[in-house]
Amino acid sequence: MLRRAFIATVGATLFSRATAHIGGHGVPGVALGGFDPVAYHDGIVAAGQASLQTTVGDQVYRFANRANRTRFLMAPERYRPAYQGFCAYGIRMGQKLKVDPLAFEIIDGRLFLFLDEGTRNVWRADQADNISIADGIWHRLRDE
């Protein structure tokens, strides 16, 4: 019962922050707030440089160094965040929510971002089910 109450509280927080800025971090209009998507896979949160950026689809990515940019260009789908960088738990709840780029997790080679650390912890409680549900919902939300 306590867990359900906690999830309900987190859910209410998620929906109230749906229009919040990217957690006070990063560069608006740039994927991941300007943080380097390759660095996340190395367990590092690193700011990207405007001079080291590339566009994939409709998203601009920045990189901390040339080596990371090269790694990304060789396999962009490997490094692009799940759900275009929206909060993974928000997607699971049917909402596109902004994230704090410092709240992330790499799961089976995929980069997942979260509204905040608390949301990431709720995600971890049922990680496999949350991924399955969010993946299914994402197909509907992706183009909205």
Image (spheres, rainbow, N blue to C red):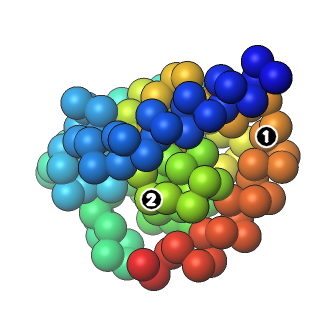
Quarter holding the N terminus is: top right
Tell me, yes or no, if residue 96 can be seen here.
Answer: yes
Q: Residue at x 42, y 51 (%)?
A: 97
Residue occupying image coordinates x 49% and y 58%: 95
Dot 1 corresponds to which residue?
127
User: What amino acid type should be assigned to the residue bearing mark 2?
Assistant: Lys
Q: Quadrant of the C terminus?
A: bottom left
**Discs 1, 2 touching: Cβ within 8 Å:** no
For residue 91, side relative to residue 103 (left or right): right
Type of residue at label 1?
A: Gln
Residue 31 image point, x, y percent: 33, 55
Visible residue check, residue 66: no
Towards the viewer: 3 or 63 = 3
User: What label does residue 96 carry, if any?
Assistant: 2
Q: Is residue 17 left or right of residue 93?
A: left
Vertical order, 92 against 125 (above or below): below
Which tag is nearer the camera, tag 1 or tag 2? Answer: 2
Q: How many marks?
A: 2
Q: Is residue 129 left or right of residue 51?
A: right
Q: Position of residue 32 (x, y in %)?
A: 36, 47
Residue at the image position 83 percent from the left and 49 percent from the top: 129
Closest to the observer, 38 or 80: 80
From the top left corner, tell me how far across and down residue 2 is, in percent.
Answer: 76, 18
Q: Please rate how many residues cluster around mark 2, counting C-alpha atoms within 10 Å: few if below 14, some from 14 to 19, many from 20.
A: many
Lower position in the chain sequence, tag 1 or tag 2: 2
Mark 1 and mark 2: span between their CA atoms?
18 Å
Q: Position of residue 67 (x, y in %)?
A: 41, 45
In the depicted structure, whether residue 110 falls above or below residue 39: below
